[in-house]
Amino acid sequence: MSKTFKKGKTIVKALENVSFKVRGGQIYGILGPNGSGKSTLIRIISTLLIPDTGSVKVFGFDAIKDHLKVREFINRVSAEASFFKKLSAIENLIFTAGIYGIPRRIAKEKIYEISQKLGLDEKRLNEPLENFSRGMQQKVALIRAFLTQPKLLLLDEPTTGLDPRAKLEVQRFIANLRENGTTILLTTHDMVEAEKLCDELAVIYKGRIVVSGKPQELKNMVKDHRKNVTLEDVFLYFTGYKMEEAELEELIH
Ligand SMILES: Nc1ncnc2c1ncn2[C@@H]1O[C@H](COP(=O)(O)OP(=O)(O)OP(=O)(O)O)[C@@H](O)[C@H]1O
Ligand SMILES: [Mg+2]
């Protein structure tokens, strides 16, 4: 698929001929620096945006023609999650559960169970969401997404901005979801996270997928005389930049 945006008079090619396949039950990673097109890709798959060209199939259904069907299977968690900020976390979550027809009692049980797994203090669930830190709100967004047991979970930078402990908790939670059979597509710019969580991944740079495969396969491609090849080396090899440099460059332009 391809997608361009107009920014004033200039045209931004957010995605250019991006193509990949996610096998059911795996965690597939989209690894790329700021501005590389990750969120655009996630928005298209979650049926919020329409690509200029190309198509997306989710469990055999066309994300454009059959967007209502596709929405039944998916859920998206992103940094711009919208909540009723004056209401408590639990009120927000029970509200969502209600929309999906989940009875209050069952929803509550599930909310407390997931909160515990994510290291979110149960007592604080009664506080208004506006009192929550970014990391805590991110966790509530994850609980909300998982309440509905999506078959495909789209996670747009689920751990960006979290403190190290929260990051580990969220990563452990994501890894557990795979064990339960959920298919996960996640974006990240964290190489360590990509390596740890992803069964397969695509490196995206300036709207193009420059390479994709299993982490080990990617590392084998750039293996030289050194022993400890990392995904950082993979990124450098295929883009000509270190991830930090690529992010800095995006910031300047
Ligand atoms: N609605 C929009 N209007 C104009 N340009 C956009 C729009 N959405 C995205 N872009 C541009 O498309 C490119 C890709 O943006 P996108 O948000 O997909 O990147 P990203 O990889 O998610 O970045 P980040 O890591 O910062 O979240 C960027 O150049 C961005 O400025
Ligand atoms: Mg983004």
Image: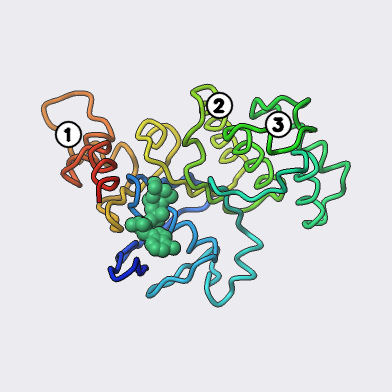
| Secondary structure category for the residue under label 3 | helix
Q: Which three-letter amino acid code belongs to the residue tagged 3?
A: Ser
Question: Which residue is painted at 70% across and 27% down in the image?
Answer: 116
Question: Which residue is painted at 29% across and 55% down in the image?
Answer: 209
Question: Which residue is painted at 54% across and 35% down in the image?
Answer: 175
The tag earlier along the polypeptide, 2 or 1, is: 2
User: Which numbered disc covers residue 237?
Assistant: none
In space, the residues marked 3 and 2 are separated at their CA atoms by 12 Å
Q: Position of residue 32 (x, y in %)?
A: 33, 46
Q: Which three-letter amino acid code belongs to the residue tagged 1?
A: Lys
Q: Which residue is mark 1?
A: 223
In space, the residues marked 2 and 1 are separated at their CA atoms by 33 Å
Report the number of discs.
3
Question: Which residue is painted at 53% across and 22% down in the image?
Answer: 165
Residue at the bottom extreme of this rendering:
65
| Secondary structure category for the residue under label 1 | loop
Q: Which residue is mark 3?
A: 115
